[in-house]
Image: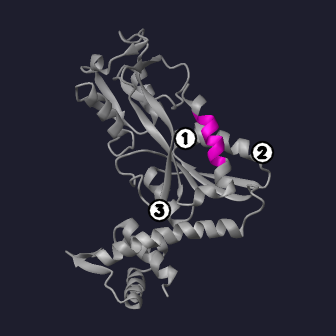
């Protein structure tokens, strides 16, 4: 018989990459986490970890076991759903996460609608980055996340998660109101190739999108300033310190002397909803997803 608690430790090692990181996430000591995996290996009669440099890596047997472990986790989600079923009526806690723009434009209105329509449902919202959202989904600490699609996300085929497209958020070129491109209905980004640029900080989820859009237009932007917050970016543009690509969902400080200009080629970022595999069948999560799908089309109009 496999001890599911030990199996969860092995899943955590795979998710976080090291025994130490997995132990920290699970509130174990590294030695205790290693002991759990060694005992699981003895129970199964196979090696699950092997040396790699100064650390360890999962064996092929461990990788095979994890495929079954992810399926077990999904079945457990369905089992909990059956045990807690209440005639399909959304009830109880619903824990959701998102990045700032998603919370402002999508998750906050979603929570208001759910509160009005499902009195027994208690929604809590947490601001998190992309990786933190996937970590807390994995740990069972949240039920639903709205995240940006980035190259560092788990692949859509990852059996631990159910990731679905929610909307495409176009980038607009933002320029000072007296800029030569300000009066245009639409602009080719190549026309801004020689401008000073304000870009997201390098580790921001949007940084690859901005550089990719400029690359598709045939140039590498001359980035003079970096900003994390879109309103900081907008203020830098307002002071004529450069131009920027800003997502249309971003709600900027009103009355700034700036203009948004739509771009040819429709550069955009993709927003996804993400649950644990099987979690989307919970009535509470299903109700939230329904509200998000209704809100999405009008969010980027």
User: Which residue carries the number 3 mark?
Assistant: 160
Q: CA distance from mark 1 to mark 2?
A: 21 Å
Sequence-wise first label, 1 or 3:
1
x, y percentage for residue 213? 32, 30
Q: Residue at image x 78%, y 43%?
A: 116
- Residue beneath the point at 35% across and 39% down: 207
Of residue 182 and residue 256, the one placed in the foreground of this image is 182
Q: Nearer the viewer, residue 149 or 253?
A: 149
Placement of the C terminus among the 4 image quadrants: top right
Badge 2 element: helix
In the image: residue 35, left or right of residue 277: left
**Foreground of the two, 170 or 223:** 170
User: Where is 99 relative to 260, above or below?
Assistant: below
* Colour scheme of the picture: one colour
Callout in the foreground (1, 3): 3
**Is 286 within the magenta?**
no
According to the picture, the residue beneath numbered tag 1 turns out to be 102
Q: Secondary structure at mark 1?
A: helix
Q: Which mark is residue 117?
A: 2
Magenta residues span 288-296
The reply to whether residue 61 is visible in this rendering is: yes
Residue 221: x and y, percent?
Answer: 26, 28
């Amino acid at each position: 018989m496999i001890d599911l608690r030990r199996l969860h430790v092995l899943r955590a090692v795979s998710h976080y990459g090291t025994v130490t990181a997995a132990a920290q996430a699970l509130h174990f000591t590294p030695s205790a986490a290693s002991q759990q995996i060694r005992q699981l290996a003895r129970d199964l009669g196979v090696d699950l970890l092997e040396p790699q440099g100064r650390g360890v890596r999962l064996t092929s047997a461990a990788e095979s076991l994890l495929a079954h472990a992810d399926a077990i986790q999904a079945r457990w989600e369905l089992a909990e759903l059956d045990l807690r079923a209440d005639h399909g009526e959304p009830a109880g806690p619903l824990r959701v996460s998102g990045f700032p723009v998603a919370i402002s434009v999508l998750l906050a209105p979603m929570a208001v609608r759910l509160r009005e329509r499902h009195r027994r449902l208690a929604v809590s919202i947490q601001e998190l980055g992309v990786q933190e959202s996937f970590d807390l989904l994995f740990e069972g600490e949240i039920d639903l996340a709205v995240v940006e699609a980035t190259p560092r996300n788990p692949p859509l085929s990852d059996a631990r998660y159910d990731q679905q497209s929610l909307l495409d958020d176009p980038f607009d070129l933002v320029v000072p109101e007296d800029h030569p491109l300000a009066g245009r209905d639409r602009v080719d980004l190549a026309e801004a190739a020689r401008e000073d640029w304000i870009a997201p900080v390098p580790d921001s989820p949007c940084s690859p999108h901005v550089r990719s859009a400029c690359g598709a237009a045939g140039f590498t932007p001359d980035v003079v300033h970096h900003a994390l917050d879109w309103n900081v970016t907008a203020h830098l543009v307002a002071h004529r310190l450069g131009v920027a690509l800003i997502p249309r969902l971003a709600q900027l400080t009103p009355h700034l002397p700036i203009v948004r200009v739509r771009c040819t080629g429709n550069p955009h970022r993709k927003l996804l909803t993400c649950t644990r595999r099987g979690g989307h069948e919970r009535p509470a999560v299903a109700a939230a997803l329904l509200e998000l799908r209704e809100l999405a089309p009008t969010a980027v109009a």
